Amino acid sequence: MEKSKLFTLNEDRSLYPEHDENGKPIVDLSSHKFLKIWQGPQHPGVTGNMSLELTVSGDEIVESKTHVGYLHRGFEKLMERRKYIQCFPTCIRMCVAEPDPNEYVLSNAIEELSGIEVPEMAKWLRTLVLEMARLQVLLRGVPGQAGTFALGLGYQWGNYLRDLILDSFEELTGGRVYHMYILPGGVRGLLPDGFKKRMEDKLKLIDEFMIKIDKLIFQNVVFESRARGLGYIPKEWVDVYGVYGPAARAAGVMRDVRKTNPYLKYSELDFEPYTTTDSDVFARTEVRYNDLKMTVDLIRQIMAKMPEKGDIKAETPNVMHWKIPKGETYSKCESSRGEYGMYMVSDGSDKPRRVNLKGPSYTHANALLDRLLINANIADTAAIMVSLATCPPEIER
Amino acid sequence: MQDTIKNLTERFGASNMIEKKPGLIFITIEQSKAISAVTYLRDIEGYTVLTLLTAVDWIEDNVFQLTYLLNNPEQITEIGLRVMIDREKAEMESAHHLWPNVEVYQRELKEMYGINFPGSPRIDENFILEGWNDKPPYRRDFDTKEYAENNFFPRPGRKTNDPAEYMKQKMYPNNPSDYTNKKYNPNR
Amino acid sequence: MEEERKDKFLAPENEIRQVAAPDGSIIEVDPLEDYFTQERPKPYKVRKGPVENFLNWARAESLWVLGFGTGCGSIEIPPLVTPRYDMFRFGVQMRATPRQSNVFIISGYLSVKTLKRVIRTYEQMPSPKYVMGLGSCTINGGMYFDSYNTINRLDHYLPVDVYIAGCMPRPEALLAGFAKLKELIKEGKGHKANEYVENFDWYKDNQKKVINDWNMPDYNW
Amino acid sequence: MDYSIQKFLWTLLGLFIVLNWGFLMGSTMRRIGARLAGRVGVPIYQPWIDMIKMISLRTYLSHGVLYYIGPVFRLVGGIGMFLFMPVLVGSEIWSNYSFSGDLILLLYFQSFGMLGMALGASESGSPNATIGISRGLAQFAAVEVPMTLAVIAIAIQHHTFSFSEILDAQQGGFMNWTLFTNPLASIAGMLAMLGAMSHSPFNLVKAPNEIPIGPPTEYHSSFLSVLRTNSAIIHVVEAALFMNLFFGGADTWFMYIIKTFFVYFISVFIGMVFPRFKIEDSVRWFLKWPTVIGIIAVLVAAYWK
């Protein structure tokens, strides 16, 4: 039986307001039916320093434009006037939340261009550091998804555990946020004494945390009712819009560089990234939750399988005079947000000719976010944005 | 992969192929055939993901190199198409109809390199910079340090060392001749 | 005015346009003139005595920080509000709007585009207000000293009360910075907002030197 | 001293106690919440310092007369609720200005503050404030339905609209509380309380990561301190309203403090573990189960005997 129009709250509003022949909504601001509001750059719901120009009709968004550039430092230009080794302190600041993939792609690009083979032990340590970096991001990111719906409790617990992982980083590398541990040819040091045991203690805490998070977030009726069906990405969009990592895996498409192009020691590790087909905010949170589980498992595997001692650095020329042969390459790895790649062109001098860093946020935050926000509620912008894990400094660099 | 390269070479006159590592190929394409080659790769060969679109400034040859890096998620291969365009009249056919993200890349290139893509949506809008009135900053002839010194207020007292000289003093304070020794420094 | 406007880069929403009033009549609107006031700020009177000391104590013990992560330093703000470092213990709280906050943490480098927003936000905060420069980027540009898009010295654009050195400063350093700021306020030295007003022209000249498309009033009330 | 002046002074004293208890309760709740997260939390005296600081801030800002009056309206709503509700059961001096029919007036005062805020917030010119206040009014309209139904059920049950008489009927052991004599009305009323208290999952008005931070976006310094004062008073008074309706009221100040604390605690505690609703969901939720229970409660009360 058809419901009466007056009492229907679930009517299909996808064709409101009127659309032109290209499917774009006709928005006439002077008709007083629409309101233009900016979310960001000073807005607590926006992931970092970026802004969204929203045209809303009531609580419903009819048009969205992403504005970036608030964090532009011109890294790619700065690196063109620095020697390769001087690029490292610059490069890691490109994505602040997860600096290690930056180090890895940069040193991997240098190694690929100059044909250096990295020793086994260094590969193990690099794998460990990359997984630890993923762990510390996800510890904040998974409960942070509930935080966008004002459930901040899990975020508080997760942040505490993240601080513990940062302590481990400090132990291993000396740095809390920026590590500069991975260098061309290898890594900077071996594991300190007792590192594995202390790490294992922290992993046990994380196991307990995972159970609590499951109860707090995934079995929460309000969270489920809000996150289900929100920000749906059809499977066909994955290639078209350039969706990577957890967001693609939530749509049922296997996008994980660790599995498709195994680098470092991932081919020797036993793991299977979680995929689901719901492709909404809830599914993306679930995928990241399972990623977190998998990362804990991977760290245990790495610590069990890695040798105690070994060569950690290949012979490299004096870094001050190191000239990289002419050529170009694209090196990539899997960050917590998806494929993270660096395109590097060398002209044979001691400074890179061109470095271009491509993170998943570039495609997620621009065309995809603009599209997903259409017909969403303004209350849900933060949730959709966080579920795509946008990281503004990586968009504008 | 080999078929794709053959087709590219025959139909689109691709040249200068370099296989960097298994599954990553860079190949040069003429400017006039570039977009049709990209369309061909996307529609026929399954290179459905545009990984990146960027430019390199070869100022000494007076060209910009545009790189379209395409990814084939089925075969797990990547092809980088290099397109050389004239630096003086930097203009390229727009590819915004192929992927929705291309528009963003092209806006960035317009802003950072001054390469125009006529017909691309929102191409003249600011993407990153705001009120910029100098040369496009990623061009090689734009000196960022000079710009920073002229426009911002450098705090006096910042010392700049030539890293090589500085390391020489730090590492071989007593015997600078070690520095030129082949054993320590293979580049000398 | 017309001449001046032509030289400037203007965002489309700031161009002179015609607007339909609710009663149907057409009015010409110049957004820069009509939507903003051009009034200049005035310094407030700094008082002395036991009452003011008491108020200063209250100001120091209740610092409301604006939640605006301007740069990479904002990654160390979440640890501050979570169990490990918990800055609420010291009466430091986060606020979401500039109208209600007193402390502006400039977390790291400022790109020119953000600087414009920062100035706007800073001027909207009620006095007395305090600025904390986080990281070496705010002191001398740090590692971005040669970047074309980041300012070098923050104190040429905004009056800075406390600098916290480091890249990036640890949360402990931030807590120490808060302690230092409290000390300054209790001593009655927390009146940099007045300095900004007194040297208004100098600050504005510096700001306008880098912000080429100045399309807002001189002081954002 | 004249009786009316005496009464006025006692009421003022009561207001003072309620205000300070509101501040203390607020910071205590924040500390409890912080313990749940593993933190220490704000010092217990933080609200008072915040008040002094807010008053000591300088402002030159004006958005027009209504902008100034908005917080005053809000405060009047809170104080009005206090004035017309008896504080302690059976006490002449602590009965404030309650009269036979005060229940109706209270329901009115509950919405008064929100309406006043709507005037002030829309005058402030911030779009976030407008969105917040429209959400607030929508939610308030939804909350009022089960709330009023519960009140009507209780009124039918006790044949009165007077607070004092409802309270008197509940005396003599906890089995006489409305909670046990009329459980359906109590459930409907308590569910409505969650909305009236505006804690998560119903804190849509000041949703910080959606519309920072709703109606008070532009309010600062003294205006904000008035709003803070009101929120301190209204939290206690709302809790006291539900305490009086369902939990048998309080006969000493000690019981008053204990009971309001627990009523308030329920709403805060639920908010700790639930995310925020969307406004549609919230309105739908209130119009569904609480309303149905409220209607049944009215019917049961009407046809019981």
Image: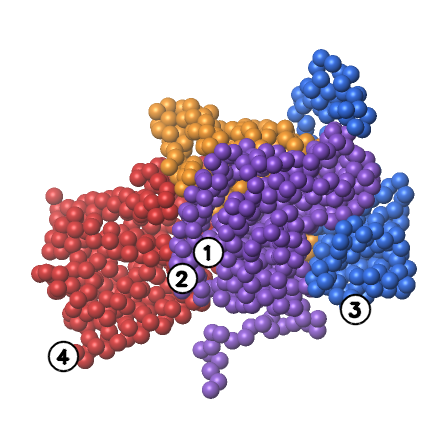
Chain colours: A purple, B blue, C orange, D red
The numbered mark, 2 or 1, whose residue comes first in the sequence reads 1
Vertical order, C169 against A334 (above or below): above
Distance of label 2 from label 1 (alpha carbons): 10 Å
- Residue D294: x, y in percent? 28, 72
Residue under label 1: A146
Instruction: Give the amino acid type for the residue marked by disc 4 in the picture.
Output: Lys
Q: Do callouts 4 and 1 point to residues on the same chain?
A: no
Locate residue D50 relative to residue A181 in the image: left or right: left
Badges 3 and 1: C-beta atoms under 8 Å apart?
Answer: no
Residue under label 4: D305
Residue at disc 2, secondary structure:
loop
Q: Which residue occupies the foreground of this view, B79 or D36?
A: B79
Residue under label 2: A220
Badges 2 and 1: C-beta atoms under 8 Å apart?
Answer: yes
Mark 4 surroundings within 10 Å by alpha-carbon count, few (fewer than 14), some (14 through 19), many (20 or more): few
Q: Quadrant of the C terminus of chain B?
A: top right
